[in-house]
Structure formats: structure tokens, C-alpha cells
Image (tube, rainbow, N blue to C red):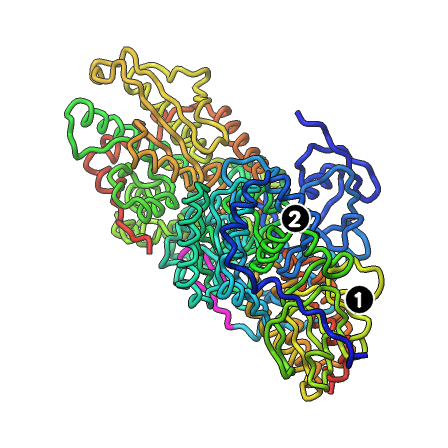
Amino acid sequence: MSNNYQLKRVDFIFKNENDWEEVLSKNLSHTPQELINELISSELKGRGGAGFPTGLKWKLSAEAVDETKYVICNADEGEPGTFKDREILSKVPFKVLTAMAICGYVIGAKIGTIYLRGEYFFLQPELNKAISEFKYYCDEIKFDFTINIFMGSGAYICGEETALFESMEGKRGEPRNKPPYPSSYGYMGKPTVINNVETLAHAYTIFNFGAKRFYDLGVQYSRGSKLYSVSGDTPKPGIYELELGMSLSDFVDEFGDGDTKAVQVGGASGFLVPRKRFNETTIGFQGKLTGISLPTGGSMMLFNSSRSMFNVLDNYLVFFNEESCGQCTPCRVGCQQLLRGIKAVKSGEKNAQYLDKLLRLAETMQYTAKCGLGQSVANSFSSIVENFREEMIY
Amino acid sequence: MEKKIKITINGETVEIEPGTSILDAARQAGVIIPTLCFHKDLCIAGNCRVCVIEIAGQKRLSAACATPCEEGMEILTNSFKVRNSRKHIIELLLSEHNADCTRCYKNGNCELQNLASEYKIMTQDFIRLVPFKNYTIDMFSPSIIKDDSKCVRCQRCVRTCAGLQEVNALTVAYKGDKMKITTFFEKTLNDVVCTNCGQCIIHCPTGALVEKNYIEEVWDAIADKSKHVIVQTAPAVRVGLGEELGFEPGTRLTGKMVAALKRLGFDAVMDTDFTADLTIMEEGTELLMRLKSVLVDHDPEVKLPMATSCSPGWIKYIEHMYPDYLDYLSTCKSPQQMFGVLAKTYYAKARNLQPESIVSVSIMPCTAKKFEANRPEMHASTYRDVDYVLTTRELAIMIKQAGIDFVKLEDMHFDRLMGESTGAGVIFGATGGVMEAALRTVYELVTGRDVPFENLNVTPVRGMEGVKETSILIENPLKEWSFLAGVELKCAIAHGLDNAKKVMDSIVSGESDYHFIEFMACPGGCLGGGGQPIPTNPEIRLKRAEAIYAEDAGMPLRKSHQNPEIIKIYKDFLEKPLGEKSHQLLHTRYTTRKRY
């Protein structure tokens, strides 16, 4: 089927940035409630990977009663294999800024902050230029909204929204307990909307063309398009905007090198899908009635048969051993046990059954870790060990 | 009041106040959920995950300490999933912990050990992580030993040091597998702003933070026939010791404690309360002198408010944090050090002993006292004034080691010369006590009348409020003190260094116009000290405070200046408060320290 099937390419995000002034002033003439309704009816979900309904997020913050509120753009793009936000911020920064301003208007915030990944310092000069141009226009139309940049310091965990707040507050980047959620208690304890860069770019599309054009893309529960960062064993690595809900086999037909053994969906904290499951796996948010549906922040890593899945997993676990914030037991100690565990099995110090104990541990980590990251660090372990057990042992 | 909400815990319906955490709701319903990083004194961390529970309809488990109840929640605290997960978490903690329990100082009083025992973790399948790490033990502080290999990263110490005490000597550094609790630039505790208050020790669930103990040294001294070993006991010890020996918190055990010390083989058992009374004589007089210098002589060199100087944790704190304000401190040594210097001078002379043959031991509710005794200026007797400082916990260990059946002991009295005390000395152990004792004496000194409170109980200075204030109007003073007529003596009391900081900041900003302030480093005063029995919490501290005030109320003499041994020491040895000998022996100076 692959020969005549075309993946539905979409071209929203990187196009039509020049009309941002018009989009901004046009939307400011609507009521906040109208804008929220528009966003809700688009069924846009967070593009950072967790997939929380964006309209609902804005609504909750809009309803929170407080004089001071904040809009934060999460540009701490740290997931291994993800590089789409960098592209958005360098190619179409005004879309992000406009969506932040509209969000500020909707919820009643006057300050927006872009939390920029430490390694993206080179984006800062251009982004600052865009911000001052944007500010100039806001002043011109007498709209009170200021955007600034906060530079991250290189910790992966600070992409987790509450750890990001802590980091911005000058503290150690460690996730907070939830509840309270950011919509009522975010940065500085104030109601805060925090959206991924791409989410904001999509919001711009919706505010520009209306919810329907966005909603018409994708499948049930997974509406709209999504940017994918394609990497690994592929002849054409890069960033692609595709409709949500595609099947993994279609994806591999398009991007694979003909020898694809597995695809890691969602980066190091995502799931590995082996070839035998390509057909039944779709890319989108959970809630689909049949088959497996995997969300992703955009990272799609392809592996061909030359790759050792043991090495792949080892690499992920080394990453998490370094990047876990270390505060909660399941994530901090669990990661160490998984890493040392697979090495011990490989070297024969532990027998193969030890992997089963580690799989149960991985389940505990998913159930009990304090934050979204901790709950997902064991995903790659479970999916790799379940599907490539023999490669772990021999 | 908001309407109560209904939840079920393990199928039983419970009605609770909105906002209650699942942990508290379960406790109210008689369901125990194990915890590790949770402590009543501290903010919620929710990081050990031992208290995870299942909420019906949720795939993931939640931390009971950090999750508020919501209407209709169905909570399971002992489901298959909860049990397995909890066991895993305890196993993980043990895999990272240097579980060499028999060689651990906290063996038998360790929350991790209790959890392991409860969940019967008999096998250790997970890989032991300790050998892979470069752990070091910090033993440089005279008060505190920090052993990272036993740390479970619950951050109770960090929350204590930052939140409860606002000292921030301990902090979290690095991330992932290298995450650890450490100090500024990973210096030793001796080289950072640590005040040695020991609050981290009594909040640590394991043996990662313990006091430096001097038990063997004291046993050796007792065994040495050529040594005359004397011991002093601080006021708060007698109301805390029982907790280590099977009594309820707040049991007064002065007589039994004295009997036990005698059985341990100390040559003389005397009382820090005696020098507490002496401190009041010196400090009270100093306060009056300062008032005179400021109000009458307008001497710009003399500073008010005068701050108390009994708490060595507080002293080190102000030396680090407010080095420009050391002139505000009373120059009086703490009761421990007054006792130490008198033991090797006054007592030695009276008993016809060579000072070098005397080994002076003190039993303190405090770890900072170990540091204090070690200060270079504390050699006024020309010998080290206090040789060994033991905490209440160390004394309990010695009593157990000696095979003393504490419950059966008959009450005994302190030995003479420096063993007599008044109620004023006893209340030094509670927050507000020094203030109350001082007011009882100072007011009478100035007016010739009792302090104007029923039964001498200066109630506004009592209680557990963080900062307490009171003022006393001085009317019809004696002729000598006529300049104080109509003066409203303004006093404040702060306990816990976070509260001390508040008061100090108000002095720095010039907002406050106090004359006299009592500062105690630990919450509740000495009775909540870092050397007291573990565990500690607000209820326990309250019971200890009640015991202290009951002890005071039961004393025949309750004003320091009435203490016959105090009268005697001034007559025979010191001559008068702030006299030459006092200056030489009982007063000290302070050291400017840096913050880093």
C-alpha cells in the first residue's frame, strides 16, 4: 500500500507569518470567552507531549481570580531527538509572540516569558529583536503586554512545567507536587498558562484561520497537525508537519531506509515500537478506540537492523541517570537500578529473569514518580525489554 | 467553617475538613500510612513516595502527604498495587543506603530501618549502589557528623536548615544519580554557616546526620581513678530524658536522673540550673547597667536592645549573619560555660581539688554546646572549662549501657555547692524562660516588689508563638533606679532561627524599639534542642514545656536572687554581679564570622 499512499503533509506552521499584526488586532476585538471557545472547539492539545487540552488550560487560568497572571512559553526543548521548537522560534517567532499576547489578553496577564533552553543561546539576539518589534506594535495599538526571555541553564527536568517555575524563581529546578496546578498556582504562585512553543504556533493558526481548518485535520481525539523531528536511520532527517493520526507503517514507508527495525516515538521518555507493531500503531493522543496510540512531543527516531537495542537503551538510561532531578526515589534510584540492571544481565552477573523484576520496577516507577518525567522514564526500558529481550541478554 | 467533605478510605466513609491531606484524613480515621520524608515541623516535599496510595479511577498512585482530599474520593491504602509499589520504593531506598545497621549510631532509632522491618525486606535483589559512589564522612565539626552513604535524600535536613532555621547551611546539589545533600562549595560543616543547632539531626530519619558523641571519652574519664569527674545537667534534659527510657513525653524525672548519674560513677552531680540563676544575676545587672548608660549617660558605645547569649546556636548564627551587631549581645557566658569555669576555680578551691584533675562533663539538650565548649575563649579557668558535652540522647545511651533500671531508681538530690537552683533557673529550658527569669529578678531589684504577674508567672512570654512581645511599666522604683520611673521595658522573645531572623531584621531596619530580647536557636527553646530525644514535633515540645513550668511551679524558691548558693558564691567568691572576678570568669567576647 505504501507505494501509492501519500502522507498528508501540512504547511501551516512555517507559512504566513507576515500577517501577525493583523491577526493580533483582529483577535483582540473578540471577547476572551469567544477566543477560548474557538480554541476549545479546535480540540488543540498540548504539543509538548502530554496533550492537555489547550483551550481548557486557558479557560482555567482565565477563571482564576488574581490581579497578576503569567503566560509562559516553554522553549526548554530538551527531549533527545526533538528540534522543532528551535526551528519555530528561528523561522516564525512572531506567531509564538502573537499567540502569547492573545493568551495574555484572554487570561488577563500582562507579562509573557519565553523560557529558552540554555543551549539555544544563539537564538537570543534574533528573538530579542522580534520581541522589541512586537512590543513596539503592542504599544502602538495600546495593548499592554511585555515579553521577555528567561535563559534556562541546561537541565532537562526544567522542561517539566513546575520545575520550570522553580527555575524561573531562582530555585533548584525540581518539580512541585500537583495539585495545585499552574492554572491556579504557577510561576510565583500566580495563575499561569504554560504552553509549548509549537502549541502556541498552532494556536496562531487557529486564531488566524478559525478552529475548523485545524479541526478538519487529524482523527478523533487527535486533531490538527504536528511537527515531527525525524532522526536516526533515515535518508531524510528533518522537521515535517504532518497530520495527526497517521499509522506508524505509513510513517516508516515515508521516512525509513527500507530496513527499519524499530521506531522510538516521543524521545528518550517515549516508547519503542518494533516492526511487527508498525501497522497497529498510530501517532496521536490516547483515547483512540482501537489499536495503540502513542503521543509524542515530536521526536521520531528510526533504527535499522544495524543498531543494537541494548546500546540504544543504555544510552537513554545514561541520559536519565544524569537528568533525573534526583528528588524522588522511584526516578532517582529506579533509573540507576535499570541502568546497572541491564548491564548486569548483559554481563551475566544477573540472570535473565532479573529483567522481569526490573519490568515490575519500571511499572512502579510509572505509578509512583512525582512528576510526568519520572513517570515516563521507564517507558523506553519497558518497551525495549519487552520487544528485544534477546538483545538485552546475549 | 466550610462544609465537611466525604471520602472513603479502604471502604470506610470518613468526613473531613476540606483541604485535609489524605495522610491526615487517614490518621483521623485510624489508618496508618507509612511516611519517610514527611515531618510535622516541615513543609511538604512529597519526594520519598513511601506514602503512595491508590485513588479509585486513577492509574497512577498519589503521595498521601501531598494530595488534598476531594469530595467522593475513594482511597485505598493497602491495595495490591500500593503494597507492591511501596515495597519497591523501600527496596530502592535500601539499595542506595549504606545499610550496615549494626555499626550505625542510629541503629534502633531509624525510620528507614523501621520501614524495612515492617515490610520484611528480607532479600535485597536490587543492585547495591553504595559501592559505586564516592561517599565521604564529614567529621570535622565538633557537633555534627554527616555521612552521605546513609542519606536517603528525603531533604528533611534541607527543609529544616532552610525553612525552620533559615540558615541554609545544608542544600541540595547535583542531579540524577549524583544528587546529594551538601554545603556551600561542598565545604565541611565546620567551615560553613552551620550553627551546630542540630535540628537537622533530630529531623533526619536515618543515621546520615548524627551528633559527634563523646560517650567513650566520658566512660574513660569515669574509670580513671586520678580524675574527679563532675557533671552538670541542663534544665531541658530532665523533661526530655524520659522519652529515651520508655516514659511519655513531658515526664519530669529530675530525681531519677540525678540518681542515674550517680550510679554511672560521676563524682559530683550538680546542676546547670544553678548557673542559670547566676546568669540571671549577671545578665539582669548588665541590662540595668546598659539601660543606665543609654538613658542617663547617653553613651553611644552602649547598645540596646540587649540580646541574650545563652544559646550557642544563636551566637554562631549572629556571628555569621549579623556580625555588625555583636555589641548587642550580652557579654554573659552561657550557664554551661559559667558552670565549667566555676567548676575548675570555685568548686576546685572549695573541695580542695587540683583543677587539672577535674573532668567537667555537661549533659545538654543541644549539639551547639559541643561547639561552644570547644571555643578558644572558653578557657577562663586556664584549663578547658567544659571537657565533654553529651546530649540527652548520649546520656540515655550511657544509662542503658550501665544496665540501670531507670524506672526503679529512687529520687536523689543534686550535690551541694553548685546544685541548688530556683524555678527561674529551670524555665531556662523553655522559650521565654530566660526572659521570665530575668524579669522576676530585675523587676524586684529595681522596685523592691514582685513582678506584677499572678504567682510570678509572666504568661505573655510563655507559649509556642514564634515571636512574643511584652512590656512592663516600671513604677515607683527604688531611689537608686529612679531614672527608670515610668519607663516601659519592652521585651521580645524569638525561638527558632527563622524567628530570630525576623526580629534581627526589624532591629537592622530600625523598626523595633525593644530593650531586651531573648533569642533561642531551637523551636520551643532548649526543650526542642538538637540534642533532645528523637522524634520531635510540636505536641512533644508542648508537653516538655508543660513539664518545665510544672517543675518551676513546684519549686520552693522561684527567683534567681533567692538561691542560697547564689548568695553564697557572691559572698565567698565573686563578690558582686559584674564585679572584677565576674568579668574575668563569667563574661566573654564574640567573633566576627563570614557567611562564606
- The residue beneath circle 1 is A292
Please identify the quarter of the rendering in which residue B105 is found. Answer: bottom right
The boundaries of the magenta stretch are B134-147
**Residue A287 visible at all:** yes
Q: Is residue B526 above or below residue B511?
A: below
- Horizontal side of A303 relative to A76 (left or right) equals right
Residue B79 vs residue B294, the one in the foreground = B79
Q: Mark 2, chain letter?
A: A
- The residue beneath circle 2 is A39
Q: Residues within 10 Å of mark 2 (few under 14, many from 20)?
A: many
Q: Circle 1 — which element?
A: strand
Q: Is residue A263 above or below residue B216?
A: below
Residue B405 vs residue B371, the one in the foreground = B371
Q: Residues within 10 Å of mark 1 (few under 14, many from 20)?
A: some
Q: Residue B419: x and y, percent?
A: 41, 36
User: Which quarter of the rendering shows the C terminus of chain A?
Assistant: bottom right
Q: Residue at x 53, y 37 (%)?
A: B239
Q: Residue B17: x and y, percent?
A: 69, 32
Q: Residue at x 45, y 31 (%)?
A: B427
Q: Residue at x 64, y 41 (%)?
A: A34
Give amino acid for label 1: Ile
* B482 within the magenta span: no
Mark 2 or mark 1: name the one nearer the start of the chain.
2
